[in-house]
């Protein structure tokens, strides 16, 4: 960021060049908010349909030019007046300005939600103590955070901000979770990095649109340093067991670190252990006999090079497809062992660096980052994304589950046909048997992707079932494939929430028993009956569909946990717990919504479905409802009241407080 000049030091040419890179919709909303210029509001817009959402866009080149000219005038004048701190402008204008960036009218009833999403106050998801709470009241309430990935960092920041004492236990040597562990070649986020950052990290200058692993990990390290979290963290220390002591109303934590056992008693626990952090290895005969290097994608040995090596990639999910093109570039030979093909979606920005001009806009146009963030969220509006992920019960087709789903499929099949035109024998093997969007969509670069890799002379697709691993490679379809490196890109134990920790609640209650009926569930993805003061972030039902990015839901879960703890402190209470009734009411709501979701398609083979044919990981409830409930757990049914951010109404009918 240091090489990006301040506005005060920028020439007209620098300003003009930067503005030419601005997203017109972002520019339109932010300029309107800053200036109130009605020309911006009155522009003619082109309208298009995305599922159930009609979205408008700046229509003509002339309008884009007008927008840019106005931005340049504004910026020059701001520079010439000394570029002092800018005021956000009238609050009453905000919903209209944000709507102008979204491309559709954001309803008044959702005003707080969308303003919150734009993160004007990056610490708004923290605790806002009511007056009269002395700092001493907080100091006796100790919270344990388990894990320091994206969720654990969020919990630590919010607890620190609230002045509540906490300890973070982290089994790894560094923060970052997923992004610390996954260092396989080509590992990269498939959510735009600017949408995959915390609200309090909004100012971080991401150097790529979709950061590769190293760059995304730098962001997490930056959070740990910027907010002073390392001194609260016990690294290389794994929590093995947690036991609730009802008499003391406390959790006893047993952890193991390099210095031996840690036995700690805390008032509450925020579990941030993720569900994509425990590798799932396949069971294939002969695995132990392999004499080369074998690893899971999340355990890629530091420094392992594929240069000139023969590599087997086993698995064709997101990690397998992501790594193949990168490995193929320097390996002597690569084999992709694929049981089921997956749907890929090309995105021109996927491998692109952030242009300096965009970094300049983010640095120098006041609140540009906020409107940019809002735009990223708004483009994922539930009326468009969720509708696209729902099946139409009346639609009949062998391959798709709704008319919209069919369009997506046709479009993707055409893309695969084009990509593999020179090798038609690969096309059928690369067209997935499942409807698109019934499993995790894989984002790819339009040109540098799994299909392009399969066209290389040194890459072969093997779709015969694997018979066994031999000391020298893989045997499939009666043929031996000799390799030096075996990469198991076979996913995670996604359905084993909290595993392998031993968690015992009130009267020795076992989570395994609670979940025996049909797999893991959690009230709002965060709480379990019989397990007081235990909160989860990235718990069951945390993969949401549209409206928010996953990180937004995780920040909400953390907000729910930290505000609940603050509620206990404020009310001088010891414990809070969801009632069994509340837990099952929420479960019913989940089941009701899930019936329509594409991911329940019987053909889908992915971690979305558990052995009971439902999903423990996905959240089918519209994120706007989840937002209301998680902000105000007192209101578990979809009531008319949008709660304010006050602290008092936390404990309602579904939550028992003692
Ligand atoms: C390869 C890959 C790519 C992904 N890409 C995206 C993406 O682009 N967009 C997106 O939204 N999501 C993506 N995800 C999902 C991703 O897991 C979440 O977005 C997010 O990282 C979850 O953060 P978390 O902190 O909740 O969990 P994690 O990142 O999994 O962190 C959990 C932390 O808890 C620690 N821990 C676990 N158990 C214990 C214990 N018993 N004691 C102490 N510490 C413990 C772990 O060491 C780890 O540091 C991806 C996942 C994977 C695996």
Image: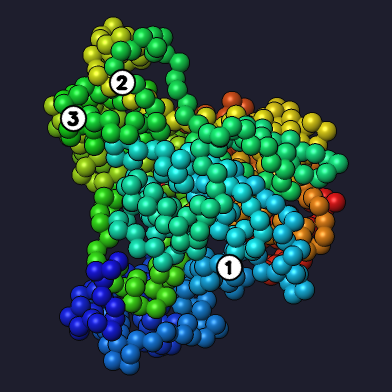
* Number of residues whose C-alpha sits closer than 10 Å to that of mark 2, classed few (under 14), some (14–19) or many (20 or more): few
Residue drawn 34% across the image and 21% down it: 294
Q: Can residue 55 be seen in this view?
A: no
79 relative to 634, above or below: below
**Label 2 with label 3: CB-CB less than 8 Å:** no
* Number of residues whose C-alpha sits closer than 10 Å to that of mark 3, classed few (under 14), some (14–19) or many (20 or more): some
* Number of residues whose C-alpha sits closer than 10 Å to that of mark 1, classed few (under 14), some (14–19) or many (20 or more): some
Badge 2 marks a residue whose secondary structure is strand
Residue in front for this viewpoint, 450 or 141? 141
Badge 1 marks a residue whose secondary structure is loop
- Residue 48 place in picture, x, y as percent: 38, 63
**Dot 3 corresponds to which residue?**
307
Residue drawn 74% across the image and 48% down it: 267
Q: Can residue 333 be seen in this view?
A: yes
Q: Does the residue labelled 2 lie within 8 Å of ligand 1?
A: no
Q: Does the residue labelled 1 lie within 8 Å of ligand 1?
A: no
Residue drawn 24% across the image and 63% down it: 355
Viewport quadrant of the N terminus: bottom left
Mark positioned earlier in the residue sequence (1 or 2): 1
- Residue 440 place in picture, x, y as percent: 44, 39
Describe residue 601's horizontal placement relative to residue 463 as left or right: right
Residue drawn 36% across the image and 15% down it: 465
Alpha carbons under labels 2 and 3: distance apart: 14 Å
**Dot 1 corresponds to which residue?**
124
Alpha carbons under labels 1 and 2: distance apart: 48 Å
Mark positioned earlier in the residue sequence (1 or 3): 1
């Amino acid at each position: 960021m240091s090489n990006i000049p301040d506005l005060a030091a920028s020439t007209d040419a620098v300003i003009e060049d930067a503005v030419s890179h601005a997203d017109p919709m972002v520019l339109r909303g932010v300029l309107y908010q800053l200036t109130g210029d009605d020309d911006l509001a009155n522009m003619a817009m082109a309208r298009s349909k995305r599922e159930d959402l009609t979205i408008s866009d700046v229509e003509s080149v002339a309008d884009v030019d007008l927008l840019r000219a106005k931005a340049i005038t504004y910026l020059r004048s701001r520079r010439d007046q000394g570029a002092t701190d800018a005021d956000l402008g009238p609050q009453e204008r905000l919903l209209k300005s944000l709507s102008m960036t979204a491309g559709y009218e954001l309803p008044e009833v959702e005003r707080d939600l969308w303003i919150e999403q734009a993160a004007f106050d990056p610490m708004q998801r923290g605790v806002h103590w009511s007056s009269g709470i002395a700092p001493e009241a907080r100091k006796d309430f100790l919270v344990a955070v388990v894990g320091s990935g994206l969720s654990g960092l969020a919990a630590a920041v919010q607890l620190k901000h609230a002045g509540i004492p906490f300890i973070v236990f982290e089994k790894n040597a560094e923060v970052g979770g997923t992004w610390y562990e996954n260092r396989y070649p080509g590992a990269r986020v498939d959510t735009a990095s600017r949408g995959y950052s915390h609200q309090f990290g909004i100012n971080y200058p991401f150097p790529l649109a979709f950061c590769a692993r190293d760059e995304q990990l730098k962001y997490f390290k930056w959070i740990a340093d910027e907010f002073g979290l390392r001194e609260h963290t016990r690294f290389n220390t794994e929590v093995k067991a947690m036991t609730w002591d009802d008499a003391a109303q406390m959790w006893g934590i047993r952890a193991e670190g390099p210095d031996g056992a840690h036995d700690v008693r805390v008032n509450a626990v925020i579990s941030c252990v993720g569900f994509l952090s425990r590798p799932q290895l396949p069971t294939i005969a002969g695995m132990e006999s392999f004499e080369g290097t074998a690893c899971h994608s999340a355990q890629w040995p530091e420094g392992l090079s594929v240069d000139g090596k023969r590599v087997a990639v086993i698995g064709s999910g997101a990690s397998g497809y992501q790594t193949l093109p990168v490995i193929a570039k320097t390996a002597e030979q690569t084999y992709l062992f694929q049981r089921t093909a997956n749907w890929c979606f090309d995105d021109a920005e996927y491998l692109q660096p952030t242009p300096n001009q965009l970094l300049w806009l983010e640095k120098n146009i006041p609140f540009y980052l906020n409107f940019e963030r809002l735009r990223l969220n708004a483009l994922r509006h539930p009326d468009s994304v969720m509708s696209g992920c729902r099946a139409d019960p009346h639609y009949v087709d062998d391959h798709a589950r709704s008319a919209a789903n069919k369009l997506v499929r046709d479009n993707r099949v055409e893309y695969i046909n084009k990509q593999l035109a020179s090798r038609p024998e690969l096309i059928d093997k690369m067209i997935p048997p499942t409807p698109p969007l019934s499993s995790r969509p894989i984002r790819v670069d339009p040109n540098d992707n799994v299909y392009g890799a399969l066209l290389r002379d040194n890459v072969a697709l093997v779709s015969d079932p694997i018979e066994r691993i031999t000391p020298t490679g893989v045997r499939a379809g009666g043929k031996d494939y000799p390799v030096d490196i075996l990469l198991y890109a076979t996913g995670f134990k996604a359905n084993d929430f909290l595993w392998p920790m031993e968690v015992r609640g009130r009267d020795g209650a076992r989570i395994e028993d609670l979940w025996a009926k049909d797999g893991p569930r959690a009230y709002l993805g965060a709480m379990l009956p019989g397990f007081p003061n235990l909160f989860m972030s990235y718990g069951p039902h945390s993969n949401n569909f549209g409206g928010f990015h996953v990180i937004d839901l995780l920040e909400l879960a953390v907000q729910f946990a930290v505000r609940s703890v603050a509620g206990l402190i404020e009310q001088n209470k010891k414990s809070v717990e969801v009632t069994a009734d509340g837990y099952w009411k929420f479960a019913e709501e989940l089941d009701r919504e899930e019936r329509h979701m594409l991911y329940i398609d019987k053909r889908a083979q992915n971690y979305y479905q558990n052995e009971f044919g439902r999903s423990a990981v996905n959240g089918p409830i519209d994120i706007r409802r989840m937002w209301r409930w998680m902000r105000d757990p007192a209101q578990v049914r979809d009531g008319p009241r949008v709660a304010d951010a006050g602290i008092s109404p936390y404990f309602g009918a579904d939550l028992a407080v003692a």
